[in-house]
Amino acid sequence: MYVCICKGITEKQVREAVTSRNSNNPKEILKALGVGTDCGTCVEDAVKTLIEQSARTPIEMKDTSNKS
């Protein structure tokens, strides 16, 4: 099902973005996909999809600290 009709973004694409990115920040993921940049009516549904997928898929954050 389409989440963002303006950009042609599907629920599947949103779910894949959650698992493929090293981020648990919804704003960052939606911005990368371009969701909500036109009319904005899709943001609520996209965030719901992100939350549901995040609950199913634990995201491992990369350690970006410079430990030596």
Image (cartoon, rainbow, N blue to C red):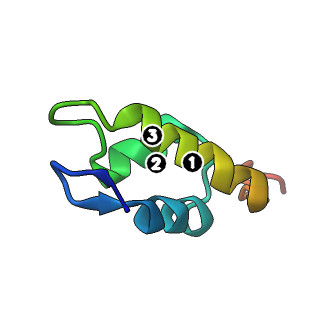
Q: Earlier in the sequence, mark 1 or mark 2?
A: 2
Residue receiving disc 1: 50
For residue 37, what is the image quadrant?
top left
For residue 68, what is the image quadrant?
bottom right
Residue 2 makes an appearance in the image = yes
Circle 3 residues within 10 Å: few <14, some 14–19, many ≥20: some
Callout 1–callout 2 Cβ contact below 8 Å: yes
- Residue 49 higher or lower than 42, as above or below: below
Residue 3: x and y in percent read 35, 51
Q: Cα distance, mark 1 to mark 2?
A: 9 Å
Q: Cα distance, mark 3 to mark 2?
A: 14 Å
Label 2 secondary element: helix
Residue receiving disc 3: 45
Give residue 11's mark.
none
Residue at image x 28%, y 36%?
Answer: 36
Residue at image x 30%, y 59%?
Answer: 9
Residue lying at the far right in this picture: please name it: 68
Residue 60: x and y in percent read 77, 60
Residue receiving disc 2: 29
- Residue 9 higher or lower than 44, as above or below: below
Q: Cα distance, mark 1 to mark 3?
A: 9 Å
Question: Looking at numbered disc 3 in the image, what kind of residue is underneath it?
Answer: Asp
